[in-house]
Amino acid sequence: MAEAEGGGSGRVGASAGGGGAESLKAKGNEQFKAGNYLKAAALYTQAIKQDPNNPTLYSNRAAAFLQLVKLSKALADAETTIKLNPQWEKGYFRKGCILEAMEQYDDALVAFQTALEYNSQSTEVSRKIKRISQLARDKKRAEVVEKMRSNVDMARHLDKLKSEMSVKRGSEECWEEMFSFLVETMESAVKSWHETSKVEARVYFLLDKEETDTEKYAPAVNIDKAFESPHTHGSCFSFLRQYAEDSFSRAACLVTPKSIMSYPQVWKGQGSRKWKHGQHDGFFVQFETPFLRKLWFISSSIELGQTLCRDPEDLDISAHELIPRLFKQSDS
């Protein structure tokens, strides 16, 4: 906790009316110690009027303003303290504390390091430097995490797939529509996970704009029961394959959280099916087209109290598929 200066350690020179100012400062210190920071600040202000070149008075008032969260006024007083006595570490210490409250950690660190130059024995300043260094690192990491959470861009992780699709179906316009469909589905899932720490188990279908009976077929099917047992899994797959055919879907994208999957637990395989992606929570995305199949796992972690999805990890679909092939295979 901040303390007001009692003695004249910061005093460079006395000015007229110093005796009255000292009495007012003493009263201000009493109010400060009692937690009456507004009264303390008022008394320091009266003292400053009588002794305007006394750095200790500005330092004490800066401490009072800091407790009152009047940070701009506090910073101005800290700067005045430094101006009146540049060799006194207390002015820099006050400035550092105020900048810390403003969450300007880099500037606070500079102020505390300057304070330490003028008083290298101060354990209080050394503790502050250690604390602020950690806060600065945490703040920078928090900014990185928030940027990663808010700027979801799946397309940049799928350049290889985009090239592969272009080679296989470059002469057809539909592959670009399929790629956009995948990107939008993955980005929606990531944003949902960031906001709620969950995704719904669903299969999203890219319906044919001309052929699909949209009154009968929806673009998404809930599959929350699909992974409860081999029986529910088989029944769901049969339904989805028929749905894809009857709805004239061009592509499908399955999204499911790892946590609901009792069968198949694709992360428990051995040999060529051995899982190589840790035990993190997260969700799977399986992309199905007549000419190409892909599978990813998007793991999740908690960073500084925030849920953060990691980059999608490309899985071998032949070893870890969540469901068998949905579409009849076409020539590549």
Image (tube, rainbow, N blue to C red):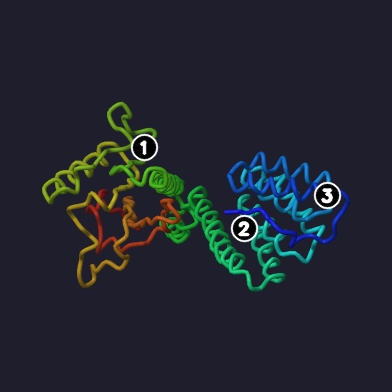
For image coordinates 62% across by 58% down, the residue present is: 105
Q: Which mark is residue 208?
A: 1
Please count the marks in the image.
3
Looking at the image, the residue that sits furthest to the top is 215
Q: Residues within 10 Å of mark 2 (few under 14, many from 20)?
A: many
Q: For this view, does 127 lie left or right of residue 227? A: right
Circle nearer the viewer, 2 or 1: 2
Q: Position of residue 263 (x, y in %)?
A: 17, 53
Q: Position of residue 277 (x, y in %)?
A: 32, 65
Amino acid at dot 3: Asp
Q: For this view, does 258 lie left or right of residue 23? A: left
Circle nearer the viewer, 2 or 3: 3
For image coordinates 76% across by 51% down, the residue present is: 22
**Disc 3 on helix, strand or loop?**
loop
Circle 3 is placed at which residue position? 51
Tell me the distance, in whole angstroms, between the alpha carbons under discs 1 and 3: 83 Å
For image coordinates 87% across by 53% down, the residue present is: 15
Tell me the distance, in whole angstroms, between the alpha carbons under discs 2 and 1: 55 Å
Q: For this view, does 250 lie left or right of residue 97? A: left
Seen from the viewer's position, the closer of residues 138 and 306 is: 138
Q: Is residue 244 visible?
A: yes
Circle 2 is placed at which residue position? 105
